[in-house]
Every structure is written in C-alpha cells, then in structure tokens.
Amino acid sequence: MTSQYAKPDSAYAAEAAAREARAVPAPVPLTRVTVVDFDMSFTHLVGFFVKAAFAAIPAAIIIAIVVAVIVAVLGGLIGGLGHMGR
C-alpha cells in the first residue's frame, strides 16, 4: 500500500513532461533593423512632447525631494563638525 502523499512513477513522468512543455524556447539570433522613415504629423508630435513634459513633473519633484534630504543630512553632518571640539 502506498501513502496518499507518495506519487507513482507515472506522476513524476507527467510532471517532467509538463515542465518541459513550459520550458523557455532557445533565443532567436538578433536581427539589425534600420528605420528609414517615420511619418508623424506635427500636431501629434507636439502632443507627445506636451504629455512627456507633464509626465516629467512628478519625477522632477521626487528627485528634488531626494536631493533636499541628502543635502540636509550632509549639511547637518558637516555643519556639526565645527562644534565637536567645544
């Protein structure tokens, strides 16, 4: 009698076949591509740049906050050096 947790050999073979079916295929060699024409109207291009500018605002705010924190920490450390001998 086998345990309810033991698997027969056929179950292991089925799992191995399923794993092999999910295996990642071999990579395809890279192909170089050259873009020779890009057709986009001026208004669509302007719209894209406006969207990009609006998307950059939150990123600039986050970067400014990170830089301010770094400057405050370094300023506190360096500014406190002058009072260490007193």
Image (tube, rainbow, N blue to C red):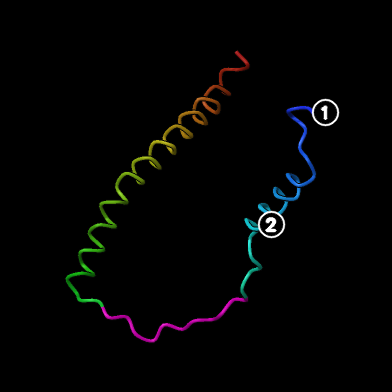
* Range drawn in magenta: 29-39
Along the viewing direction, whichever of 10 and 43 lies nearer the viewer:
10
Left or right relative to 34: residue 29: right
Assess disc 2: are there few (<14), some (14-19) or many (≥20) residues with their C-alpha within 10 Å of its C-alpha: few
Q: Secondary structure at mark 2?
A: helix
| 65 over 17 or under it: above or below | above
Chief SS of the magenta region: loop
Could you tell me which residue is drawn at 61 percent across and 17 percent down? 84
Badges 1 and 2: C-beta atoms under 8 Å apart?
no
Label 1 sits on residue: 1
Which structural element holds mark 1?
A: loop
Q: Nearer the viewer, residue 8 or 78?
A: 8
Residue farthest left in this picture:
43
Give the label on residue 71, or none.
none
Location of residue 9 in the rendering, given as x and y in whole percent from the top left corner: 80, 44
- Percent of width and height locating residue 60: 35, 46
- At x 49% / y 81%, what residue is drawn? 33
Q: Position of residue 42 (x, y in %)?
A: 19, 74
Alpha-carbon distance for marks 1 and 2?
Answer: 30 Å
> What's the residue at 34%, 85% (across, down)?
37
- The amino acid sitting under disc 2 is Glu
Q: Compared to 81, does 37 lie above or below? A: below
Quarter occupied by residue 27 = bottom right
Instruction: Please name the amino acid that badge 1 sits on.
Output: Met
**Residue 58 drawn in magenta:** no
Residue at which label 2 appears:
20
Measured as percent of width and height from the top left, residue 8 is found at: 78, 40
Where the C terminus falls, by quadrant? top right
> How many numbered callouts?
2
Instruction: Residue at the far right: name it.
Output: 1
Left or right, 33 with respect to 48, comes to: right
Find the residue positioned furthest to the top: 86
